[in-house]
Amino acid sequence: MPPKYVNRSDFCRKPPPKYVNQDWLSQNGGKFLEKVVRLSQNEGKFLEKAAWLSQNGGKFLEKVVRLSQNEGKFLEKAAWLSQNEGKFLEKTARLSQNEGEKLEKVVRLSQVGGEKMAK
């Protein structure tokens, strides 16, 4: 069993405690600083990327809005064209009616002329 009280002289015989190598600390400190710098750079890149993404997200949303606006304009234009087409068809029908009336009139006149000639 070890003695209850350790004699002070026992400490003197033990080798002095190993101190951490200063070179190792300085190297690791350097690596640590390097790591910190690298992390901060990466964070900077990350923030830059986040900013870029948010900008692009903004541009994307803007594009979506613009496309929806353009689609609205396109639909409006389509409606306008269909209205005009309706008016155009109406006009065509009216013209064809008028042309039919003209032809009828010409036939009637020619009939009347024929009757006159026959007299």
Image (tube, helix red, strand yellow):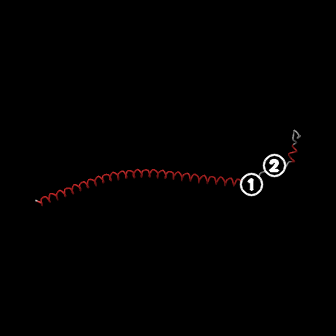
Q: Is 89 left or right of 54, judged from the image as shown?
A: left
Q: Is 109 left or right of 47, judged from the image as shown?
A: left
In this picture, is 86 found above or below 6? below
Q: Is 60 left or right of 46, judged from the image as shown?
A: left
In this picture, is 6 found above or below 20? above
The image position of residue 75, as x and y in percent, is: 39, 51
The image position of residue 84, as x and y in percent, is: 32, 53
Q: Dot 1: within a 10 Å radius of its alpha carbon, few (fewer than 14), some, or many (20 or more) residues?
A: few
> What residue is shown with label 2?
17
> What residue is shown with label 1?
24
| For marks 2 and 1 on the same chain, the one whose residue lies earlier in the sequence | 2
Q: Residue at x 30, y 53 (%)?
A: 89
Q: Is 34 left or right of 58, judged from the image as shown?
A: right
Q: Residue at x 59, y 52 (%)?
A: 46
Who is closer to the viewer here, 79 or 36? 79
Amino acid type of the residue tagged 1 in the rendering: Trp
Q: Dot 2: within a 10 Å radius of its alpha carbon, few (fewer than 14), some, or many (20 or more) residues?
A: few
Q: Quadrant of residue 100?
A: bottom left
Amino acid type of the residue tagged 2 in the rendering: Pro
Q: Residue furthest left?
A: 119
Q: Are marks 2 and 1 in contact (CB under 8 Å)?
A: no
Q: Residue furthest top?
A: 4
